[in-house]
Each structure stands twice: as C-alpha cells, then as structure tokens.
Amino acid sequence: MNSLDTMIATELAQLEAKANLRQLPQLTHRGKWVEVGGHTMLNLSSNDYLGLAADTELHQTYLEGLSVDRLLLSSSSSRLLTGNFAIYEELEEELAARFGREAALVFNCGYHANTGILPAICTPRTLVLADKLIHASLIDGMRLSSATAMRFRHNDLKHLERLLERYIDSYELVIIVTESVFSMDGDLANLQQLVALKRRYPDKVMLYVDEAHAFGVFGPTGLGLAEAIGCIADIDLLVGTFGKAGASAGAYLICSRAMRSWLVNKMRPFIFTTALPPLSIDWTLFILRLLPSMQVRRKHLASMGSTLRNQLTESGLPCPSESQIVPLLIGASADAMRQAEALQRHGFYLLPVRPPTVPEGTSRIRISLTAAQTDEEMEQLKKVISEMI
Ligand SMILES: *Cc1c(COP(=O)(O)O)cnc(C)c1O
C-alpha cells in the first residue's frame, strides 16, 4: 500500500466508526415513490417540491408536443463555440422578461453558477460577507475568488451590519451573499432587511441571493422568495436552479446586461464546459411557462409545511424551518441514522443528513415535502413522527 492507500483506508474506517460514511443509495424510482431493497416508500428526500419530476402525465404531454428538430440530445460544444442553440437565448429572454430585469444567463447547474460568478467579479479589493450557512457551492466560489471573505452568524443581520460598518471603507466593493430558503434548516433570509441594509451604501454594496430551494415554490408565479416579497429589482445577482422544484437541470442568474456580457467573457464554468443538451433547455422552458399555473400545488405544499412545523413546535422540538424543508434535529449521526431507518420501515424514504453537510453534532433527518404527497400520506407521516418523538 502506498501512503495514499493507507490514508484512505484509515480515514474511511474512521468515517464508518463515527457513522459518517457515505454510500451511494441503490434505488428505483416509481413516480413519487422509491423502491429500496424490495420496499416501496414515499420519497421525502428529493427536492421535487412541486411533484413535477414525478408527474408522468406531464412528461407525456411534453413528449406529445415534441418534434424531432427539438429532440437535440447534445449541444456538442461550449456556448461560445457552436453550442449556443437558439433555445438558450429564448429561455434567457423569457427569464429576463418574467423577472422584469435586463438580462439572464443560464448555466449547466447551480454548482457551476456559484463557483463561477464570484471568481469572475471579485478583485482583491472586494469583501464578500456571507451567511454562515450558505451552500458548499457558494463557499467554493468564495475560495476560488480573490476577494477577502468573512462570514456573519446565520441570519444575524446585526452581526452583518457591524461587519459592514467596520470594513466598508477598507474595500472598493462589498458583496453580501445569502440563500433565500436555507437548504438544511428550511428557514428564510430576511430579504427586506438585507435590501434596506444594502441601500444605506449606494454603489458600494451588492446583494447575491441563491434561490435554489425557493424557485417554483415561493411567489405568486413561482419565481422565488424575492418575488413573494417584491424585491427582485433590488437583488443585483439573483441565482436559482432548475433541478429542484423546476424538475429539470441547470441554473440561472438574473442580472444587468453588462454583467451578463462580463460573465460570458470571464466566467470559467460558463466558458469551459459543453452546454446542456438543447432538449433539456426546451423542457426547462416548458416548465417555466407552467409555473404560474402551479399555485394550487404551492398552496398545498405550504399548508403541509406549516402543519408539520406546528406539530414539531407543539411537541417542544426545535424547528427553525419556515418552508417545505423541515428538519428533525437529532444531534448524533448514529441516532439520526437509526431514526431515519425507523421512518423508512414505516414507508417514508427519509435520510440522515450528517457532517460535513451540516455542522458536527447537528445531524438531522431532512424532510423535503412534495406537493405530490396527499393529505392522507401527510396524516400518516405526522402519526409516525408523533410516535417517534
Ligand atoms: C442544490 C443547490 C445548488 C446546486 O445546484 P445544482 O443545480 O444542483 O448544481 C446551489 N445552491 C443551493 C443553495 C442548492 O441547494
């Protein structure tokens, strides 16, 4: 064994001993259910919040309207070479119009968006102030950039304000980075207050908001929390992804026209990658056009979220969530694994979320509600949880 083999063997054994070893689950999808080891369970671990990815009728409708000229399964190139099929710009124009902003740029995924935007726009004279609980892709984007990065305590705008006051004069530009719906606690950023804070420093502070878990779910036409709150125009860099409630793949940035051109020139994960298949973009556009009509699903999802959150709060359990993502906070990874297995035996496919995805000692079961879940299934889930807690 060479030194790398030895290191890998030791560390894997340590991960296993701490119940933090990860393995790729073997599962078969059947609409909103998954089958694992011969056992069929309701899937409450995906991000298919509106139930669109599990909706076979919807896929059938899409396929019936599809013609061979749109059935392009590869772009065969970066968009800067020959991969810029017209459907890309159609999607971007529609996004910009729907958000009421100058421009939009589409990326292959949210991970690309977040690892690419900050490195392309930051200089050593930029300060990034980021919420403590932002997604790993944003953390990697900060690390790859030449900015100075600091974190403020989760959703603690007083802390952010102090950092701003203290450092604003030492930098040319400050970029505040947050998610709108946080992926692990399901709580919300206070976008209104963030906008108010930004406005105190005109031309000096920018807002970068990641709506990965809010796109499709929040807002009267499903554009996200910024739409719900009415502050789309105030968010300089508004990112969202299509792979969650959007039931597709890819990500978008809503921004100024100049910013779009800059990123087309400078953003490495945009430039140096083969564009998504045009078919995938076509399907995203199909979904985007449907989102305004999904209000019934959004209401059902919101109402299930509030029912579940109330249940936890009434049982005296900590429940930070304000959305469709409801964590059962457990603590030790081994306990979270055991509880998740118990829930699975009752027919709910729930998984433990462990470090390094969440901080040490905060292992949890992350319930991702889906609008495909019926009221009866929700009642059953509540019953199983009440027996567990
Ligand atoms: C899922 C997620 C991403 C990554 O998006 P992908 O399209 O899956 O790469 C980025 N940000 C947040 C907050 C996410 O939850």
Image (cartoon, helix red, strand yellow):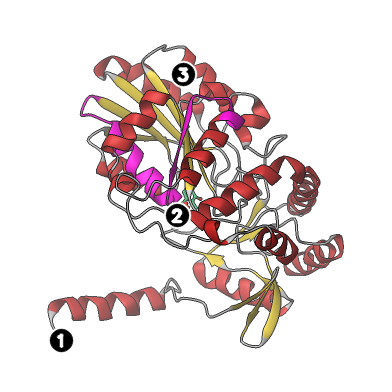
Residue 241 position in % (x across, y down) = 52, 47
Work out whether mark 3 precedes mark 1 in sequence or the reverse, and give the earlier one.
Answer: 1
Q: Kindly state the secondary structure of the residue where label 3 is placed.
A: helix
The residue beneath circle 1 is 1
Which span of residues is magenta-colored? 97-125
For the residues labelled 3 and 2, say whether their Cβ atoms are less than 8 Å apart: no
Residue at horizontal 64 percent and vertical 24 percent from the top: 230
Rounded to the nearest whole Å, what is the CA distance between mark 3 and mark 2?
A: 29 Å
Q: Residues within 10 Å of mark 1 (few under 14, many from 20)?
A: few
Is residue 209 inside the magenta stretch?
A: no
Work out whether mark 1 precedes mark 2 in sequence or the reverse, and give the earlier one.
Answer: 1
Foreground of the two, 333 or 102: 102
Q: Residues within 10 Å of mark 3 (few under 14, many from 20)?
A: many
Instruction: Residue type at mark 2: give it.
Output: Pro
Asked if disc 3 is less than 8 Å from ligand 1, the answer is no
Q: Which mark is residue 198?
A: 3
* Relative to 234, residue 356 above or below: below
Residue at horizontal 49 percent and vertical 18 percent from the top: 197
Residue 24 position in % (x across, y down) = 46, 76
Instruction: Residue type at mark 3: give it.
Output: Lys
Rounded to the nearest whole Å, what is the CA distance between mark 1 and mark 2?
A: 33 Å
Instruction: Residue type at mark 1: give it.
Output: Met
Foreground of the two, 133 or 239: 239
Is residue 210 at least partly visible in the picture?
A: no
Quadrant holding the C terminus: bottom right
Q: Where, by quadrant of the figure, is residue 189 drawn?
A: top right
Depth-wise, is mark 3 or mark 2 nearer the camera?
3
The residue beneath circle 2 is 359
